[in-house]
Image (cartoon, rainbow, N blue to C red):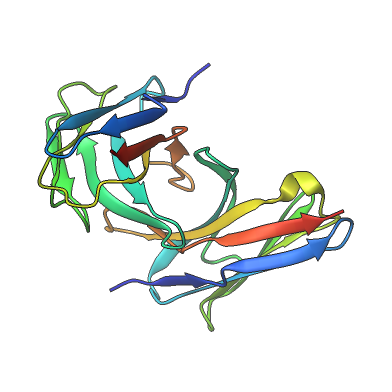
Amino acid sequence: GEDVEQSLFLSVREGDSSVINCTYTDSSSTYLYWYKQEPGAGLQLLTYIFSNMDMKQDQRLTVLLNKKDKHLSLRIADTQTGDSAIYFCAESSAGRRALTFGSGTRLQVQP
Amino acid sequence: DGGITQSPKYLFRKEGQNVTLSCEQNLNHDAMYWYRQDPGQGLRLIYYSQIVNDFQKGDIAEGYSVSREKKESFPLTVTSAQKNPTAFYLCASSTPGEGYGYTFGSGTRLTVV
């Protein structure tokens, strides 16, 4: 079946860049997503990328997609304490019933 | 403002009791989903519905039931057959379009007492 994997934890200092990585197995993925979850809350869609794109930039967020290696990354520039949260990678493909989510990466930003 | 409302935010269930979690959306989305979140395990799909009066089992449907009588509403019942129901439950909705991204509710934390 489809699988999405992420590392569980990342710690950075305020002002540094954060890079959160994700790998997936489904070669027919059409869209890949990054969601953010703050404590006790639902998931908030941060950004997404279509599978025929290599990169997408949105303010402090940069998404890189290596379709050959099935590797997705999210770079957060100038990371702030308010960026501390769990970040989920997810993917979809045509005809699939629902998004498949990774287990989430907890980002801790130290002042 | 449009969005998804889940209620209650916290719910306590006694052993052997059925409880129902509410999910309402005013986004005019066709599809709705229920996910369960456990620490370190990400989100697992319980049930989903792509249209009114139709729903399908997800990966962990045992011990749960749903209904979709209205487009706006997709309640989830956690039955006594669910042996380990303590978790954070998330409802989401989506509509076909660019990105097919989901809008999530704020979640219900269910605890067995």
Q: Residue placed farthest to the bottom in the image?
A: A69
In this picture, residue A44 sits left or right of residue A19:
left
Report the front residue among B36 and A55: B36
In this picture, residue B56 sits left or right of residue A50:
left
In this picture, residue A91 sits left or right of residue B13:
right
Residue at coordinates 56% horizontally, 68% vertically from top-left? A8
Report the front residue among B113 and B5: B113
Q: Is residue B28 above or below residue B106?
A: above
Residue at coordinates 62% horizontally, 67% vertically from top-left? A9
Q: Is residue B91 above or below residue B99?
A: above
Residue at coordinates 58% horizontally, 43% vertically from top-left? A39
Q: How many marks can you see?
A: 0
The percent position of residue A100, horizontal first and vertical second, equals: 38, 60
Report the front residue among B75 and A50: B75
Q: Is residue A82 above or below residue B6?
A: below
> On the image, which quarter does residue A29 sit in?
bottom left
Residue at coordinates 38% horizontally, 73% vertically from top-left? A26
